[in-house]
């Protein structure tokens, strides 16, 4: 009985039973359902049309499931190889970049989380200033390209964003929330600050470290602007740049007089769609894992301190 | 009193007591040297990649010539001709400035008025749903767009709206007839709606998380009490739910207002093309095109500095106002 009574109530405890409320409920379900549909429909269309023939894409009215099923676009991008090279480069950029991010953020966060640290306010203010103000794009560009000469190296993608003040503060707040007694106990047992950090604090911070790593990793994977500014070498092209290039090329691929082998003419629209699919799949594969920690991370981040 | 041994003994007794309250740097460094060593990577990084570029802002007050001096950017910075506020004068009186301001504000206000409240409304809707599996599934689906890159969002936009084979364009044509669909990707009047649409699609779902968290923290007893007092659905929402998430809304609003001139360049740069450039040029793209691609470092830095200063004033101002209104603010 109690269970039924509970089920009858909305999350705000309001008892919806009048016909008017039923109508409102139905409308809310329809709105939510439509929103969910709108979020996935573009992906389905791109997936469907990547298997369509060029002719069908250009001539048939809107569709999601192609009439004639074709692998041409995928054989083309496998043969071309650019998008897979892009995926490899992006993976490298993401893994190393995230490792650098986490190293700099954690080593910064732990001292700042210790209330007794002399000079803590000074260092904290240094962090707050960079959150509010910066040199902007041109000085940063000149620094990376002309002073440090990092152009056409992945360091140009790793170093300028090696730490996000926001993410660092999330970790710092989490360290602050760990009971002081644990640190005291470790100190009494003869542990120095480094040991306490590595053996006590980090192992206790699993959820926040996972969440922040994912913030950083998704950021690296999705970034394209720095790669566009600093990397011209096609061998170092990341997947986002590759996708952008292919979209921009699809409109004039036909005119370039390239020998397209067995396909006669390039499957341009389908290639564009297939490239989008290949570039999207990795993030969707890790999505279920990401979602859990990201959601948790947003909660952690919303706690001020 | 004059007995030296007593004085010495007293001194000895005092010494450890004093050292407990003695917060000298030497002692702090000796006791917690690891903490200071750990600070090094982050502090060095901030100095090089955040504070050094701030020094580069001198360019805004110079007629910067990268080849001035004995070679290298640092030397060029110190040897370029100092022009004071002349770059700012040129920026404010130039024809570009009004256009940049208008385009930037058009995009920002569209986002502020529509993309900002959207997740709040959607969170309130989700909060009313009783069927848990439906709610969970919907949430999983609407969060997805947040995780794909802007390039993919752009790719999807092209595939839905390009005039040759766009899905939506074909839908319109199937009703209006072939060739009667508007050229959405290549016309100035659709640029802001496209940006807004991308933002709504990408961030509305994910934006609900923070509000749903605030909503989950509302004490159910408040609802019960209000219900006993005869409150209906709308009264509950207006008098219980909204006040409960007011603090979160204010914080998100402060961040939004502070970023009013930061339309971001990644998204706009992708959608921008020869046909819609007149409405797509904002401060961020201007800085990139003038400075990084065009090599006009001084004027680009000036535009960037103007934007940063205005943003800083706005975020501090919004924070102040929030505090005056009794909210907790950002810091």
Image (cartoon, coloured by chain):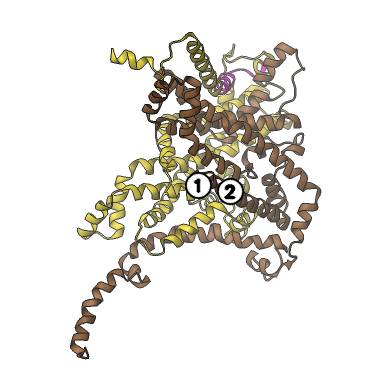
Chain colours: A yellow, B brown
Q: Quadrant of residue B107?
A: top right
Q: Please tell me whether mark 2 sits on a helix, a strand or a loop.
A: helix
Q: Quadrant of residue A45?
A: top right
Left or right: residue A63 compared with residue B95: left
Q: Chain of mark 1?
A: B
Q: Residue furthest front?
A: B229
**Residue B163's spot in the image, x, y percent?**
72, 23
Q: Residue at x 24, y 56 (%)?
A: A184
Left or right: residue B2 compared with residue B275: left
Q: Residue at x 65, y 28 (%)?
A: B158
Q: How far separated are the C-alphas under marks 2 and 1?
A: 9 Å
Magenta highlight on residue A178: no
Q: Residues within 10 Å of mark 1 (few under 14, many from 20)?
A: some
Q: Residue furthest top?
A: A19
Residue B319 seen in the current view: yes
Judge whether A69 appears above or below B184 on screen: above
Which residue position holds label 1? B330
Residue A281 seen in the current view: no
Magenta-drawn segment: A41-55
Which of the numbered marks, if any, corresponds to residue B315? Answer: 2
Left or right: residue A29 compared with residue A118: right
On-image quarter of the N terminus of chain A: top left
- Please name the predominant secondary structure of the magenta segment in the image: helix
């Amino acid at each position: 009985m109690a269970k039924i009574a509970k089920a009858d109530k909305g999350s705000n405890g309001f008892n919806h039973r009048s016909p008017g409320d039923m109508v409102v409920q139905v409308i809310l379900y329809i709105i939510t359902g439509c929103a969910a549909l709108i979020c996935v429909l573009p992906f389905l269309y791109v997936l469907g049309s990547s298997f369509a023939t060029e002719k069908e894409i250009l001539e048939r009215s809107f569709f999601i499931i192609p009439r004639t099923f074709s692998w041409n676009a995928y054989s083309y991008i496998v043969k071309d190889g650019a998008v897979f090279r892009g995926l490899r480069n992006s993976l490298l950029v993401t893994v190393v970049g995230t490792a650098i991010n986490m190293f700099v953020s954690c080593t910064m966060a732990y001292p700042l989380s210790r209330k007794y640290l002399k000079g803590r306010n000074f260092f904290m203010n240094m962090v707050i200033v960079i959150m509010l103000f910066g040199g902007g794009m041109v000085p940063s560009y000149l620094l990376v390209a002309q002073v440090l000469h990092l152009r056409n190296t992945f360091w140009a993608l790793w170093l300028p964003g090696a730490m996000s003040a926001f993410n660092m503060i999330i970790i710092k707040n989490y360290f602050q929330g760990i009971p002081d007694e644990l640190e005291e106990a470790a100190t009494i047992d003869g542990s120095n600050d480094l040991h306490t950090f590595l053996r006590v604090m980090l192992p206790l911070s699993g959820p926040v470290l996972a969440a922040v790593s994912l913030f950083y990793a998704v950021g690296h994977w999705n970034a394209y602007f720095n790669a566009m500014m600093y990397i011209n070498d096609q061998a170092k092209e990341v997947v986002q740049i590759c996708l952008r290039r292919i979209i921009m090329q699809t409109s004039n691929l036909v005119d370039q007089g390239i020998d397209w082998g067995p396909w006669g003419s390039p499957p341009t629209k389908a290639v564009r769609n297939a490239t989008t699919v290949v570039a999207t799949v990795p993030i969707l594969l890790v999505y279920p894992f990401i979602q859990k920690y990201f959601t948790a991370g947003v909660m952690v981040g919303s706690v001020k301190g | 009193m004059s007995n030296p041994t007593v004085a010495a003994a007293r001194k000895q007794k005092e010494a450890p007591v004093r050292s407990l309250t003695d917060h000298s740097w030497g002692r702090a460094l000796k006791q917690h040297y690891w903490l200071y060593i750990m600070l090094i990577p982050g502090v060095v990084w901030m100095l090089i990649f955040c504070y050094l570029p701030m020094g580069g802002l001198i360019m805004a007050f110079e007629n910067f010539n990268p080849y001035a001096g004995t070679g290298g950017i640092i030397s060029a910075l110190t040897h370029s001709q100092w022009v004071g506020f002349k770059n700012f004068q040129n920026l404010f009186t130039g024809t570009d400035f009004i256009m940049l301001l208008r385009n930037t504000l058009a995009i920002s206000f569209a986002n502020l008025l529509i993309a900002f409240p959207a997740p709040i409304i959607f969170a309130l809707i989700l909060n009313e749903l009783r069927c848990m599996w439906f709610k969970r599934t919907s949430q999983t689906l609407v969060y997805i767009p947040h995780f794909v890159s802007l390039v993919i969002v752009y790719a999807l936009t092209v595939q839905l709206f390009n005039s040759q084979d766009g899905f939506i364009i074909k839908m319109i044509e199937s009703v209006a007839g072939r060739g009667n669909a508007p050229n959405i990707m290549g016309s100035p009047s659709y640029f802001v709606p496209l940006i807004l649409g991308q933002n709504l699609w990408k961030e509305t779902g994910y934006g609900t998380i923070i509000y749903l968290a605030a909503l989950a923290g509302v004490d159910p007893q408040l609802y019960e009490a209000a219900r006993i007092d005869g409150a209906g659905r709308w009264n509950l929402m207006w008098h219980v739910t909204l006040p409960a998430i007011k603090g979160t809304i204010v914080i998100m609003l402060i961040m939004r207002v502070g970023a009013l001139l930061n339309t971001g360049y990644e998204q706009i740069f992708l959608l921008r093309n020869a046909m819609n450039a007149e409405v797509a040029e904002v401060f961020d793209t201007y800085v990139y095109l003038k400075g990084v691609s065009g090599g006009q470092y001084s004027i680009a830095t000036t535009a960037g500095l103007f934007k940063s200063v205005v943003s800083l004033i706005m975020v501090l101002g919004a924070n102040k106002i929030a505090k005056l209104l009794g909210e907790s603010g950002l810091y």
